[in-house]
Image: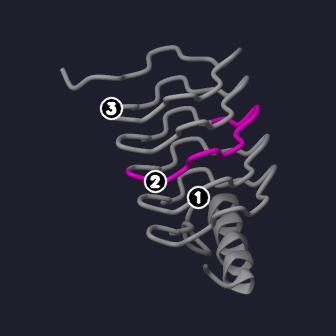
Amino acid sequence: MIDLHMILEKLENHQLWLISSGKKGEPADFSFDNLSGLNLSGSNLKKANLSATDMEAVVLENADLRETNFQSAHMEEADLLWANLQGSNLDGANLRNANLSFACLDNCSLKNTDLRGADLRGAALNNVSFLDL
């Protein structure tokens, strides 16, 4: 698992990058890291790279995850209650048994995403792409 100090540093640099419109800091890149079981509720990870990240049972309630790359991420049993994932890439992600209740998944790409057992009650699913056309 990635060191907590490193996580906080990446989140701080990411916030600086967002606030400065890319002039300071840098976008968070947690690709291939292990964030399993962490509570990141309310975090702003907009446009972050979480591809192939191990995020089993991570808590991201009310998180801003717009336009985030979750391609091939392992998010089994993740808690994404009220999370905003609008425009995110979730292709090939494992969201088995995840809580996506009331999450915004508008304009997301969910090609080959495993949603077996996921709770999608109240989730926004406008213009979601499930298939390659």
Query: Up-down: is 27 above or below 41?
Result: below
- Mark 2 residue type: Ala
Q: Which residue is mark 2?
A: 73
Going from the N terminus, do you reach mark 2 or mark 3 first? Answer: 2
SS type, badge 1: loop
Counting from the top left corner in percent of width and height, residue 68 is at 51, 48
Query: Up-down: is 91 above or below 131?
Result: below
Q: CA distance from mark 3 to mark 1?
A: 19 Å
Q: Residue at x 56, y 72 (%)?
A: 26
Counting from the top left corner in percent of width and height, residue 130 is at 35, 23
- Rate crowding at label 1 as few (under 14), some (14 to 19) or many (20 or more) other CA atoms within 10 Å: many
- Rate crowding at label 2 as few (under 14), some (14 to 19) or many (20 or more) other CA atoms within 10 Å: many
Number of numbered markers: 3
Q: Which residue is mark 3?
A: 111
Q: CA distance from mark 2 to mark 3?
A: 13 Å
Q: Are marks 2 and 1 in contact (CB under 8 Å)?
A: yes
- Mark 3 residue type: Lys
SS type, badge 3: loop
- Nearest the eye: 109 or 101: 101
Q: Residue at x 69, y 16 (%)?
A: 121
Q: Which residue is mark 1?
A: 55
The range drawn in magenta is 72-84
Residue 27: quarter of image: bottom right
Residue 8: quarter of image: bottom right
SS type, badge 2: loop
Q: Main secondary structure of the magenta part?
A: loop
Q: Is residue 83 magenta?
A: yes
